[in-house]
Amino acid sequence: MMRRLQSRQGGRRTELIRQQTQNARVLSASERKISFSNTTSVNTDAVSESNDRYRLLRNLIGGLERKSTVLMAQPPVKDYDFYIEMFGNSGKAQTFTQTGEDNVTEESQTEVEDMVTKWTQQPAQVPDDIGWGAEGGGVKYGHDDDDLHLFRGPSAAQSEALHKFMDVAAGVMYDLLASTRHSGEYFSMQNKSKFSFSAGYNNFQLVPTANESKITSITRSKTDEYSFLCAFRVIQSNHPSIIKRSLLVEYPLDRNAPPQRLYIAQSVVNSSVYSDDGTMLFAGLQDGSIVCWDLYESAAVFDHRIPWLDSKEGISLREPSFDTSFMSSIIHDDRTTAIVNVHVVGSSGGSVFQLCALDECGTVSTWTVERLAMPSGTQGCRPGSRLMLTLSSIVRPDASLMRQSPSGSVMANCIAVMPDDQQQLLIGTDSGFIASVSRGKSGGYNGPRLYKSPMHVYGEVLCMRFSPFDPKILAAGLSTGSVSIHKAGQVAAMVILTPSNSSRTPVSLIEWSPM
């Protein structure tokens, strides 16, 4: 019976037992790994350097005088009210008066008869701004009392600490702007090279700014690896301001853009170099003078602009901040001797360092370079410029060097400074040897006077460069296309690298690989 009732009523609901199914893991998720190899790590050297810079800037800021000015809205004061407040209604005497109650005429005395008190000043305004006569005070004249200067002291604009702070702050901003923009990326090369070691090359030219020009010097900045300076001798151009002059163009290498800066020089540029901090540019000219530019100066200081492709307003033409042409006759004995090489010595990022210039006769002139707090206006300095070059010493070639040449005369081509002793200079000559010259009176150098190589085989010494890995190793580029490797203290070359006959062109520039 119970079964029949259960069957008619449909029985109890059968509960389905659901099995818990576990979702399969995604294949990509199972192979996913977390790597901490590329996480950012704290660079203790960079943190230490930033703390040192912050401490120096904080000390400069703390040394400045702090002044505060409070401006108040002071309403003008009437002269009469000011007088009454100062002196009151004193000076008046009244004996008697008539009230008008009695119709009697009596004598009345006023203050006019007994005492007259008046104040006046003629003229109303005097140069000392003291006195009365006008509401709201007198006219302010642009002068101060001489005695007040004893208490006020120098203003903030004349403070030496402020100038030092502005120089350091400008240097920090320049380093930030000139820092590496795209680390780890290759330059964009427009042309392919046939050499296996080269990724390509780019052409640098002045078209259409100049119809005909010639490259005389190239150099790279020591702080900005993405800039390249090229000096052109302009022969023909549509712009008369650059014809028969040198135009130095600073190209950006990491992007296709107009030049960053343009510099103008009156003569042919034979050599150019940046300062160690990258804030100054020096050039040795064919007429025997040296010119320099201050890269801290704004482009708005210069009036002339040169039209350029992809530049809407053109590029400012920077004139030299200092020119040593007024000293050329003293250095070169009233002769026009070209400067063949310039080299920065002992910069180390300071505001005062030295510059060595070599002329083609072998004379080395040393200049002290300084950035002043205020424009000096001395001879050779452009108005408004703060750079100044002072001649420190002149070293002329010894007569014994002249006897080393078969012709009796030696022409200098390049100069290099010993890394271990910056008083010692090496001069490459057209006779094939390298001469060692001291620009000071220190007698601590015991090396050879000459570094020789067979001239009839390898030719002139055109360029030199010390190794960044070993300060005693020197590479010299020769006019026959060979490269000689020398070691300080040894007369003969360690090895001479000779190219094939098809590649024997003069070596005009030599560089060591970074690694």
Image (tube, rainbow, N blue to C red):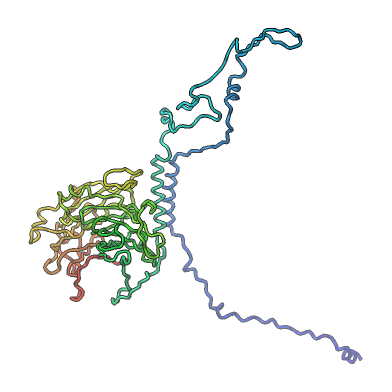
Q: Quadrant of the N terminus?
A: bottom right
Q: In the rendered image of this protein, does residue 93 appear above or below residue 480?
A: above
Query: Which residue sits at x=37%, y=51%?
Result: 301
Q: Nearer the viewer, residue 179 or 122?
A: 122
Can you see residue 417?
A: no
Q: In the rendered image of this protein, does residue 145 appear above or below residue 474?
A: above
Q: Nearer the viewer, residue 304 or 29?
A: 304
Q: In the rendered image of this protein, does residue 53 appear above or below residue 28?
A: above
The percent position of residue 286, horizontal first and vertical second, equals 21, 57
The percent position of residue 471, horizontal first and vertical second, equals 25, 60
Query: Which residue sits at x=41%, y=62%?
Result: 312
Q: Give the image quarter of residue 469.
A: bottom left
Q: Quadrant of the C terminus?
A: bottom left
Can you see residue 456?
A: yes
Q: Give the image quarter of residue 482.
A: bottom left
Query: Which residue sits at x=20%, y=71%?
Result: 505
Q: Is residue 307 left or right of residue 486?
A: right
The percent position of residue 211, horizontal first and vertical second, equals 28, 66
Q: How many marks?
A: 0
The percent position of residue 337, horizontal first and vertical second, equals 17, 54
